[in-house]
Amino acid sequence: MAIEAIPMWIPHGVLHEGAEATVTAGSWLGRPAVLKTRRARGYRHPDLDRRLTRQRLTSEARILGRLHELGFPAPSLIDLDQGEAWILMSRIEGRPLYESLKDGSSGIGSLEHLGRIIRSLHEAGFSHGDLTTHNVIVSHDWQVHLIDFGLARQSPELEHLGLDLQVLKECLTASHSSLEGAVDAVVRGYLDGDSAPSETESASRVIERFQKITGRVRYHG
């Protein structure tokens, strides 16, 4: 089925062509929306590819649903079709943090805010899996939102939580090296965002694991 045939969906244009999926901007019932369509991977057996695609779409939809219930700043799920391999979500109006850091409209304060948001995600029992400044949206009211939960995990291990911060560190180092103290700002926000005791790892233990991962990367690099 062509994406134009999805009920009440009006496509406006492609936002991103990735290795795993195509992301299209549009509207649904007049509301800004985003459609992510996963593409088949030719190097995998078709049956395995379909099974993995269904699993990932189901996991992403479940995580988005739970985050919406918690009031977490992320897209809300609108619709899902496992057979056609697409997921329809609300669109967060704003700009990628990547752009606003580049032009100076966002700075250390936004990164501290991001650290607190990441901590709240971890306390909710999820890791993101692809925390780059392209997957953070700064809305028009300067709030920070996370997008693209295609690699997110539910009930993650401590290593996955530390890896979230390591991926973000590598992004900040590579793409925003002129912004001094960027990683330290995220860590401050993460520790500051530690709230009441939960079933997840404490903020300090996550930071310790993050630092160990950084050490391993530096050693093997």
Image (cartoon, grey):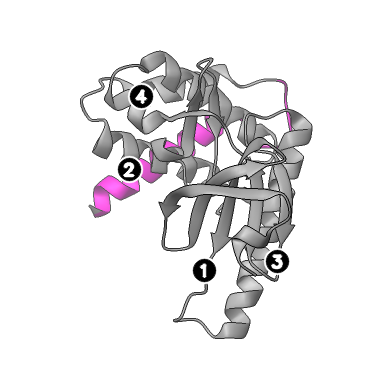
Image quadrant assignment for residue 215:
top left
Q: Earlier in the sequence, mark 2 or mark 4?
A: 4
Q: Residue 204 lies in magenta, yes or no?
A: yes
Q: Secondary structure at mark 1?
A: loop
Q: Secondary structure at mark 3?
A: loop
**In the rendered structure, which segment of residues is drawn in magenta?**
196-220
Quote the CA–CA distance across marks 2 and 3: 40 Å
Question: Total of numbered circles in the picture?
Answer: 4
Q: Earlier in the sequence, mark 4 or mark 1?
A: 1
Q: Secondary structure at mark 2?
A: helix
The residue under the point 48% across, 34% down is: 136
The residue under the point 57% across, 44% down is: 26
Around disc 3, counting alpha carbons within 10 Å, would you say few (fewer than 14), some (14 to 19), or many (20 or more)? some
The amino acid marked with disc number 4 is Ser
The residue beneath circle 2 is 215
Q: Residue 64 appears at what percent x and percent y?
A: 69, 44
The residue beneath circle 4 is 100
The residue beneath circle 1 is 39
Residues 211 and 44: in front is 44
The amino acid marked with disc number 1 is Arg
Q: Earlier in the sequence, mark 1 or mark 3?
A: 1
**Quadrant in which the N terminus is drawn:** bottom right
Contact between labelled residues 3 and 1, with CB atoms less than 8 Å apart: no
Q: Is residue 191 above or below residue 91?
A: above
